[in-house]
Image: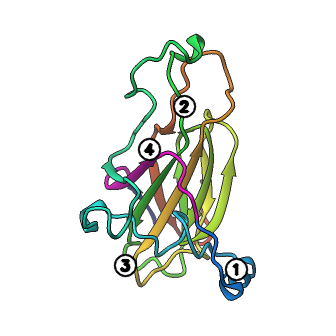
């Protein structure tokens, strides 16, 4: 059995870094440092990110928007002659993406993989608040075995931080998840 699902629709996008306030209480910081899961900020499982659930800026002051992949957020900016000409006279910001999804029924005890075909910029991938992978190139595909971290009985959340600081070339590089994302389910032992 091999099932592949393309996860290109229904992503939530935020351009720019998001300040993560530091708690004034020792207990929260202690718990955060002793767990493999992020308990706060955009990588956390319970982070409030859905634009359709905001009431003005009362719930979440950050600006998130719905996007579908592939998505390059740098290309939508106006040219700025103060920016590097080789990079298209464009400003490169960092960004966050989040995706809520469910694993299909009957996938327990299977191998579950998450594949990114391309993210422009250095990227960090989280699943349900757990740090899963760091990628340091805009030009490679990578796959993550998420079998031990995925929820089979409730919604899962992928969070991707894109860092566009530093460049790999002297051309327009873009920024964002610019290729497909796949969820692949196989038997525990499978030939790829």
Mark 1–mark 2 distance (CA, rounded to whole Å) = 32 Å
Q: Provide the residue span drawn in magenta.
A: 7-20
Q: Would residue 8 be found to the left or right of residue 147 on screen? A: left
Residue 5 rendering spot, x and y as whole percentages? 39, 57
Q: Nearer the viewer, mark 3 or mark 2?
A: 2
Nearest to N terminus: mark 1 or mark 2: 1
Q: Nearer the viewer, mark 3 or mark 1?
A: 1
Nearest to N terminus: mark 3 or mark 2: 2
Q: Would residue 105 be found to the left or right of residue 25 on screen? A: left
Q: Nearer the viewer, mark 3 or mark 4?
A: 4
The residue where tag 3 is placed is 105
Residue 60 rendering spot, x and y as whole percentages? 38, 65
Q: Residues within 10 Å of mark 3 (few under 14, many from 20)?
A: few
Residue 22 rendering spot, x and y as whole percentages? 64, 71
| Label annotation for residue 180 | 4
Nearest to N terminus: mark 3 or mark 1: 1
Mark 3–mark 4 distance (CA, rounded to whole Å) = 23 Å
The residue where tag 1 is placed is 29
Please determine whether, in this image, residue 174 is positioned above or below residue 68: above
Q: Nearer the viewer, mark 4 or mark 2?
A: 2
Nearest to N terminus: mark 3 or mark 4: 3
Q: Are marks 3 and 1 in contact (CB under 8 Å)?
A: no
């Amino acid at each position: 059995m091999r099932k592949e699902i393309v996860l290109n629709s229904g992503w939530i996008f935020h351009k720019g870094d998001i300040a993560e306030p530091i708690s004034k209480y020792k207990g929260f910081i202690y718990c955060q440092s002793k767990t493999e899961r992020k308990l706060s900020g955009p990588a956390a499982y319970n982070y409030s990110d859905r634009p359709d659930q905001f009431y003005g800026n009362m719930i979440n002051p950050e600006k998130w928007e719905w996007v579908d992949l592939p998505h390059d957020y740098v290309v939508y900016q106006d040219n700025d002659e103060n920016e590097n000409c080789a990079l298209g006279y464009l400003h490169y910001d960092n960004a966050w993406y989040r995706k809520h999804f469910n694993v299909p029924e009957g996938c327990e005890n299977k191998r579950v993989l998450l594949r990114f075909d391309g993210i422009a910029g250095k990227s960090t991938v989280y699943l349900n608040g757990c740090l899963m992978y760091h990628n340091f190139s805009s030009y490679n595909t990578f796959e993550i075995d998420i079998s031990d971290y995925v929820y089979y009985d409730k919604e899962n959340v992928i969070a991707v931080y894109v860092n566009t600081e530093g460049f790999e070339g002297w051309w327009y590089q873009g920024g964002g998840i610019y290729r497909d994302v796949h969820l692949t389910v196989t038997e525990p032992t499978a030939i790829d």
